[in-house]
């Protein structure tokens, strides 16, 4: 499901902005927007996300879980677990999660996650999970306090392989997330009806 439809571009202002527009126009859950370079990538608190062309993984995923907006914050954690697992599977490196949206290697940022959502009548319409990974970025392409997989390993990483693994890992985590949310909802209904 995740990645069944992929929109891929050389350059976008922001994958999250584009994915948000697609979601508003009814694009299905699991749709992925990817690009080689962002001119106005965003991080938490309106910080900019630098993305030299062809060096990182820049993606946004449309999700439509049937959950309350309050639960949506867990999507950042879900994405962090999924991306961390994918990085480990491909490189052997182990990341740590810095709440609310950073993955670190050796206490330096290697991945940022930005979740945004749209609600209507206090119900979640959709969520956009944006992920930016510093893969083969070096030198001036990194902000202070950041690193890349290439810097940590001392060699380049094949981005398509990591991209596929991230989508696969996101799918695994998202299926579990939805099952847990459905179970929690059933337990709540049972408790109310007693």
Image: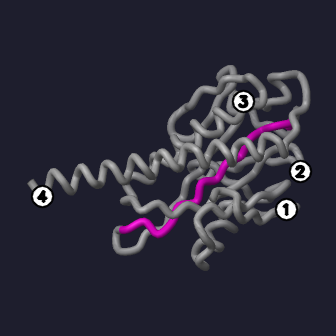
Could you tell me if the residues under marks 3 and 4 are in contact, i.e. CB atoms within 8 Å?
no
Name the element at disc 2.
Answer: loop
Of the numbered discs 4 and 1, the one sitting upstream in the chain is: 1
Which residue is disc 4 drawn over?
Answer: 193
On the question of residue 149 being in view, the answer is yes
Q: What's the distance in space between the residues labelled 4 and 2, CA to CA?
A: 56 Å
Of the numbered discs 3 and 2, the one sitting upstream in the chain is: 2
Which residue is disc 1 drawn over?
Answer: 11
What's the colour scheme?
Answer: one colour
- Around disc 2, counting alpha carbons within 10 Å, would you say few (fewer than 14), some (14 to 19), or many (20 or more)? some
Q: Which residue is drawn at 82% across and 41% down?
A: 161
Q: What's the distance in space between the residues labelled 2 and 1, CA to CA?
A: 8 Å
Expressed as whole percent of the image width and height from the top left, the position of residue 124 reads 43, 65
Could you tell me if the residues under marks 2 and 1 are in contact, i.e. CB atoms within 8 Å?
yes
Name the mark nearer the viewer: 3 or 1: 3
- Around disc 1, counting alpha carbons within 10 Å, would you say few (fewer than 14), some (14 to 19), or many (20 or more)? some
Name the dominant secondary structure of the magenta segment: strand
Q: In which image quadrant can residue 133 be found?
A: top right
The part of the chain drawn in magenta is 123-137
Q: Which residue is drawn at 84% across and 63% down?
A: 9
Q: What's the distance in space between the residues labelled 3 and 1, CA to CA?
A: 28 Å
Which residue is disc 3 drawn over?
Answer: 89
Which residue is disc 2 drawn over?
Answer: 53
Expressed as whole percent of the image width and height from the top left, the position of residue 44 reads 58, 48
Residue 156 horizontal side relative to residue 97, left or right? right
Name the mark nearer the viewer: 3 or 2: 3
Q: In which image quadrant can residue 172 be found?
A: top right
Of the numbered discs 2 and 1, the one sitting upstream in the chain is: 1
- Around disc 4, counting alpha carbons within 10 Å, would you say few (fewer than 14), some (14 to 19), or many (20 or more)? few
């Amino acid at each position: 499901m995740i990645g069944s439809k992929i929109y891929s571009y050389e350059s976008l202002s922001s994958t999250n902005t584009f994915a948000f527009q697609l979601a508003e126009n009814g694009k299905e859950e699991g749709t992925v927007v990817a690009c080689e370079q962002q001119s106005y990538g965003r991080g938490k608190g309106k910080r900019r996300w630098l993305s030299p062309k062809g060096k990182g993984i820049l993606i946004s995923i449309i999700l439509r879980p049937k959950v309350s907006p309050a639960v949506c914050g867990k999507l950042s954690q879900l994405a962090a677990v999924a991306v961390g697992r994918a990085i480990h599977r491909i490189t052997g490196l182990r990341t740590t999660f810095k709440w609310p949206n950073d993955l670190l290697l050796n206490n330096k940022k290697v991945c940022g996650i930005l979740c945004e959502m749209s609600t209507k009548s206090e119900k979640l319409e959709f969520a956009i999970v944006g992920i930016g990974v510093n893969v083969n970025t070096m030198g001036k392409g990194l902000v202070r306090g950041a690193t890349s997989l290439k810097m940590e390993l001392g060699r380049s990483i094949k981005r398509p392989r990591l991209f596929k693994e991230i989508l696969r890992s996101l799918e695994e985590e998202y299926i579990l997330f939805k099952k847990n949310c459905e179970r929690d909802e059933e337990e709540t209904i049972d408790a109310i009806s007693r």
